[in-house]
Amino acid sequence: VQIRGTASAAPWKIQRCNEDGTYDLIRATDGEGTSSVGQAFLSIYEPYDIGSEAHCNMGTYGSDHAEFVPCTILQYSSQLTKRSMVLQGKYEVRVYARDGEPEREILLPMWKVTKRP
């Protein structure tokens, strides 16, 4: 899902549905959480446009900090859907040269890509 009205269009995972009808969420890009988000503030995740600029998390899964670098969206492919809701997908991105590493094109899961504000 995405949270409406925020500067970032990052994908969020639903961690828990609360008895009061709100949701506890975890941001898929860095694992940060938020709680008690009302359904009116949630929308289905929309993949980023081809050619748009983004930040790609090149950090390792489970590490203490994310390592975001500039990248460009080249392609998106949905891996699994359920009732028009994307459950997982992958982006092909161009990651810009940094720290002596060359520019390259790689595949990343959607939770490692966030659109630049």
Image (cartoon, helix red, strand yellow):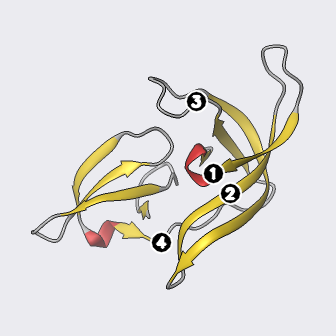
Q: Mark 4–mark 1 contact, CB under 8 Å? A: no
User: Is 59 on the left-hand or right-hand side of 73?
Assistant: left
Q: CA distance from mark 2 to mark 4?
A: 16 Å
Q: Amino acid at mark 4?
A: Ile
Look at mark 3 in the image and give the residue it sits on: 60
SS category of the residue bearing label 4: loop
SS category of the residue bearing label 3: loop
Q: Tag 1 or tag 4, which sits nearer the N-term?
A: 4
The disc label shown at residue 1, or none: none
Q: Tag 4 or tag 2, which sits nearer the N-term?
A: 4
Q: Mark 2–mark 4 contact, CB under 8 Å? A: no
The disc label shown at residue 44, or none: 4
Q: Where does residue 29 sit, x and y in percent of width and height?
A: 51, 43
Q: CA distance from mark 1 to mark 2?
A: 4 Å
Look at mark 1 in the image and give the residue it sits on: 109
Q: Tag 2 or tag 3, which sits nearer the N-term?
A: 3
Q: Mark 1–mark 2 contact, CB under 8 Å? A: yes
Q: Mark 3–mark 1 contact, CB under 8 Å? A: no
Q: Amino acid at mark 1?
A: Pro
Q: Tag 4 or tag 3, which sits nearer the N-term?
A: 4
Q: Residues within 10 Å of mark 1 (few under 14, many from 20)?
A: some
Give the residue drawn at x 37%, y 67%: 42
Image quarter where the C terminus lies is top right
Q: Tag 1 or tag 3, which sits nearer the N-term?
A: 3
Q: Residues within 10 Å of mark 2 (few under 14, many from 20)?
A: some
> Which sits in the foreground, 87 or 115?
87
Q: Tag 2 or tag 1, which sits nearer the N-term?
A: 2
Q: CA distance from mark 4 to mark 1?
A: 17 Å
Which of discs 2 and 4 lies nearer the camera? The answer is 2
The disc label shown at residue 90, or none: 2
Q: Amino acid at mark 2?
A: Lys
Q: CA distance from mark 3 to mark 1?
A: 12 Å
